Amino acid sequence: MRVFVINPNTTESVTDHIRRELEKIKQPDTELTVVNPEHGPVSIESVYDETLAGAPTLELVRRANEEGYDVIVLACFSDPALDAAKEVSDIPVIGIEEATLHMAAMLGHKFSITTAFSNRVPTRELHTRLRGVESAYASTLVMNMSVLDMDANPEEAKARIQELARKAVQEDGAEVIVLGCAGLTGYAEDIERKLGVVVLDPTSVAFKIAEAIADLGLRHSKIGRFATPPVKEIK
């Protein structure tokens, strides 16, 4: 099985971080490739960043198809260009936000999501509606740390998450905490052990779902929403 993981931002330290953590959990026979675009935002913390990251991400989706991979993971919690990626791809594309929100709704009555800054709270609320899990959404926990800071300062990030998550459990009824950033990959185990509640690392969750989908030979339906777009001239 060959899994192609895309970090849609251009920061190689985040890509390396993701690769190290996924190497620990992949099946022995899984060939893992983790890449990032050469051009685009260094981090994704707004809809503007998502839009800038979209086209370079789609080029990597096309590359994975051309090189014969079995499944693709988009390792950014904003799922930039996810629907477009499903349209242009003949192999499954798994967004870490989409996959993990559904998993969180399965594992507890209510879940809370961490995010970098307060401007992303409305996006989290909108995405829970889009994914059909709004009734299980408890709250969004604002870390006031950039994506790059979360990646570079794991102990600070973990401490901040623990502080916010305790309040979410006590005040919002959260039973599951979702780490809403690929820069937090690998942090869930330490946080869960200290909090005593379920903590989900979306990159790891989506990666294992991707392996399962590839094992089962599943594909996106191409007869409607994710139908392959017609070839046309782009000027």
Image (tube, rainbow, N blue to C red):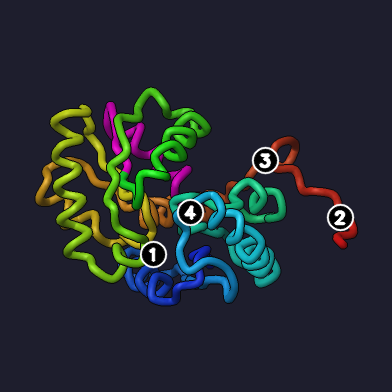
Q: Residue furthest top?
A: 135
Q: Is residue 218 above or below residue 10?
A: above
Q: Nearer the viewer, mark 4 or mark 1?
A: 4
The mark found on residue 221 in the picture is 3
* C-beta proximity under 8 Å, tags 1 and 3: no
**Residue identified by numbered label 1:** 27
The three-letter amino acid code for the residue at tag 3 is: Ser
The earlier-in-sequence mark between 4 and 2 is 4
Q: Nearer the viewer, mark 4 or mark 2?
A: 2
Where are the magenta residues, as a range? 94-113
Instruction: List x then y, in percent, for residue 208.
Output: 40, 54
Crowd tier of the residue under label 1, counting other residues whose Cα lies within 10 Å: few below 14, some 14–19, many 20 or above? few
Crowd tier of the residue under label 3, counting other residues whose Cα lies within 10 Å: few below 14, some 14–19, many 20 or above? few
Judging depth in this view, the residue of 107 and 178 nearest the camera is 178
Whole-number angstrom distance, CA of label 4 to CA of label 2? 28 Å
Can residue 5 be seen in this snapshot? Answer: no
**Residue identified by numbered label 4:** 210
Crowd tier of the residue under label 4, counting other residues whose Cα lies within 10 Å: few below 14, some 14–19, many 20 or above? many
Whole-number angstrom distance, CA of label 2 to CA of label 1? 37 Å
Relative to residue 59, is residue 207 drawn left or right? Answer: left
The three-letter amino acid code for the residue at tag 2 is: Val
Relative to residue 62, is residue 213 drawn left or right? Answer: left
Relative to residue 158, is residue 233 drawn left or right? Answer: right
Q: Nearer the viewer, mark 2 or mark 1?
A: 2
Instruction: List x then y, in percent, for residue 94.
Output: 52, 51
Residue at image location 25% in from the left, 38% down from the top: 176
Q: Is residue 7 above or below residue 76?
A: below
The earlier-in-sequence mark between 2 and 1 is 1
Relative to residue 220, is residue 235 drawn left or right? Answer: right
The three-letter amino acid code for the residue at tag 4 is: Ala
Whole-number angstrom distance, CA of label 1 to CA of label 3? 26 Å
